[in-house]
Image (cartoon, rainbow, N blue to C red):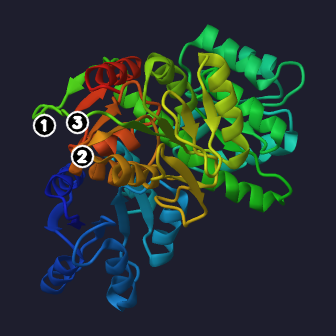
Amino acid sequence: MRALVVDDSKPSRSIVARALTDLRFECSEAGNGQEALAALAASARPDLITVNWHMPVMDGIELVRRLRREPAYRKLPILMISTEHEQERIALARQAGIDDYLAKPFTAAALARKLVDLGVVAEPAQTGGRDPIGVLICDDSATIRGILSATLAADPELKIVGTAVNGEACLAAIPSARPDLVLLDVEMPVMDGITTLREIRRRFGKLPVVMFSSLTERGAKATVDALLAGANDYVAKPAGLDAAEVAERIRTDVIGRIKSLIPRRAASAGGRSVSRISEAPRPLRQERIRGVVIAVSTGGPTALAEVLPAFVPDARVPILVVQHMPAAFTAHLAERLAKTGGLTVREAADGDLAKPGEVLLAPGGRHLELVSDTPQPRVRLTDDPPENSCRPAADVLFRSAVRLWGGGTLGVVLTGMGKDGLAGSREIVAAGGSVIAQDEFSSVVWGMPGEVVRAGLADAVLPLSQVGVEVALRLKRRGG
């Protein structure tokens, strides 16, 4: 079989080509869409094309659209392999004509499973893949349990290993079901989700748990409590929709989150959390730190609860945080962080002063920017379009901090899915500031910090337990 690998990154092309070669493909390569079209015109039709999204000259989306207009390529399997993680962006790629999508970074087994799904690799034995992810569903609604079970089981990478009607039944089922992940409702009779979660953490250590919660005021508060108690992630429960719409929401919102948690855990199992300062450190920053900006998403509440108390009490600069959460959640998160750490943490309001030693959290659904206003900077909230499919977006905050503080900006990128914070970190470094990133082993999902590290922008890559301490040391050394 023959494959054409299209990516502007030579290392990425090599990784994809090596994995395909192991699957008995003969590979050719192209660095952008135009090169790919030229290669296709000069050779026989391949059996598969893998394509990156973001490339110069002609990006992956335009290449796919052109190929789908040609009769010879309308049914050619096209797999997009790119850094996008947001479902809305992936849906755009599917509309353009891709057959399937694989997010970077990926494993050879994950690539092989995609090719089996596409029918390009016929025998599962050729893939070297692993067993499906075992999911235990705990929800008191029989309807929701039924839809969840049917929808998740339809994905070949997932397997339902059990269902439970409440927390007690869930705890009883775990030893025999041996799930890889528990999908846990927040509000249930007999034993609620938070009590169940705490028991899971006590009895079963780091077994991944995703909370399945309503977007009501009560549900939002309970979900924040669950995240701070150790839940890995949460998904909003669809309400007021028919069964088909609920199933589609589950496919869109739940499956991707489950898969994002388990590969990271498997890849890191048995590993050690290692501190790393960049191998080619930039010249030591001498400019006074004037502010700290933090980007975080999946796994963020527990990360913030550990990082902020380590440096905020003695900080003499403003601290601003973008945590990807819906509007109903961020006020509760700010309140809980303030109570838990004894800190001044508030959900930002338009026009608030960014005061030294205080933490302002971007409200869900609105971008947070810093604006110049002597004697202290103020914040501005906007409803500008999402960036990286996020609003609030860390890139928006980071850019505004650079405009105000230049090289006095200290960026921190913590656990989270996607690449928000990458472009903003690039601007911080270009202005003479510095960026700290959380390491892979301690991250729930090493998407956002991983992007920053791979781009060479982080001068320190640290386990979560050391991030706050490092910020405190830098503030002490550089006058913040």
**Kind of residue indicated by mark 3:** Glu
The tag earlier along the polypeptide, 3 or 2, is 3
**Kind of residue indicated by mark 1:** Arg
Image marks 3 and 2: residues in contact by CB distance under 8 Å = no
Secondary structure beneath label 1:
loop
Secondary structure beneath label 2:
helix
Numbered marks: total: 3
Is 79 situated left or right of 180 in this image? left
Q: CA distance from mark 2 to mark 1?
A: 10 Å
Which disc, if any, is residue 287?
A: 3
Q: Nearer the viewer, mark 3 or mark 2?
A: 3
Give the crowd class for mark 2: few <14, some 14-19, many >=20 residues within 10 Å. Answer: many
Image marks 2 and 1: residues in contact by CB distance under 8 Å = yes
**Kind of residue indicated by mark 2:** Val
Is 422 situated left or right of 145 in this image? left
Q: CA distance from mark 1 to mark 3?
A: 14 Å
Identify residue for label 1.
282
Residue 445, position as x, y percentages in the image = 45, 36
Which disc, if any, is residue 429?
A: 2
The tag earlier along the polypeptide, 2 or 1, is 1
Q: Quadrant of the C terminus?
A: top left
